[in-house]
Amino acid sequence: MQVAVTWTFFEEHWDTVTARLSESVAGDVAMMTSLYQSQPGRFEEMSRQAYDTMGLSVDLREGDVLPTARRTAFFRALDRALRRALSNTLDEEFWFDTTRYPEYVDIRVAVDEGVLRFIVVREHVFATTGHIFLLWIIGTTSLLTAVSVIFIRNQVKPIRQLAEAAEAFGRGQDRERFKPAGAREVRQAAHAFIDMRQRLIRHMEQRTALLAGVSHDLRTPLTRLRLQLALMPASEEREAAMKDLSEMEAALEEYLAFARGQAGEEPGAVNLTALCYEIGEDVRREDGGDIALEIEDGLVIRGRAAPLKRALTNLVQNGRAFGEHVVLSASRTESRIEVAVDDDGPGIPEPQRAEAFKAFSRLDESRNANRKGVGLGLAIARDTARAHGGDIRLEESELGGLRAVLSLPA
């Protein structure tokens, strides 16, 4: 806007006024030159009249010639306006200098006897208020820009704090010192966020208490059943019942893990390198499974160790359930840490990979009871990844099966 105003001022006002003043002075110079050439004997009288009536200081320099050097003003538009006006009114050669004297303009015209030199007050030739206007424009623009930057930064800061608080809460890091600030609409959004956070916290506390009660109520009868089966004589029916009971306990643990989510642990530094080696040792210790480890050293993130171990364990168990060979690898990129589980099983077709992340989905409508699990492994793993600011993606493995990649911010 300021540039448009400045352009309009110089184009419509300042340039026009300067052109009119230059034309007026050029006319006076042309008239005095013509009078001198027609009546050279009256030069002294004419020079006095020119000074008294037009403010022109006229001097005849006999035998002198016009200078050849040209000095250009900073605002070249001034020189162009004066040169155009003198060219239109004078037939003689001329020279002028607008830079030597701060308050005056030196104009020289070639005549037969030498050079007529005119000293003209600068205000009579140019509109001298242009630089003042520019100073005002630059000053006000700088002031308004500074005020705008300060104002916008003060308005953006509460929005950024609200975004950081929401992101931290999504990762399970509650910021107690967050206070609403900024414009009315921003404070309204902040109050709505605080209310929502309190409702979610109450919901999670109630869910945790409910899960603790459900876990106790279900584990007690299952323990009694296991004890009664252990006291019964060995038989095929007893072994089948023990197997069913083990599956019920495993399903119960998986349901509780899915419902419990990230509750019960404060975030801290998690050594993913040590965690991956621990998972590999657990697999070998449980059933001597074949799992290869390709883990980079020094992989540390901020998060919750137990949910991350549960998520990676689910990915490894999925790979071992459908493949004979499993590879657990972990490496760092520029800004992320990726933990991948590769297997040589049948894999998952690309159209069904989104369905695989849904809770209780086992990619077969019959839910074959011979297949271990209840379809919560990938759902739990993805919820854990997203709670830590990351995600899980499924790809085709180089081993021929499925590749599950847990990507976390470094």
Image: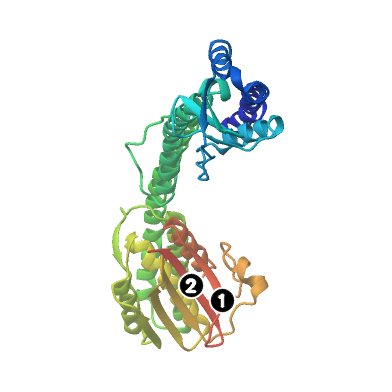
164 in relation to 371, above or below: above
Residue farthest to the front, as pictured: 41
- The span from disc 1 to disc 2 (Cα, nearest Å) is 8 Å
Amino acid type at circle 1 is Glu
**In which quarter of the view is residue 410 placed?**
bottom left
Q: Is residue 251 left or right of residue 85?
A: left
213 in relation to 318, above or below: above
- Name the element at disc 2: strand
Quadrant for the N terminus, please: top right
Would you say the residues marked 1 and 2 are in contact, meaning their CB atoms lie under 8 Å apart? yes
Q: Which mark is residue 405?
A: 2
146 in relation to 53, above or below: below
Please provide percent x and percent y for residue 317. 45, 77
Q: Which mark is residue 395?
A: 1
Asked if residue 164 shows in the view, the reply is: yes
Please provide percent x and percent y for residue 356. 59, 68
Amino acid type at circle 2 is Val
- Which residue is located at x 31 percent, y 78 percent? 277
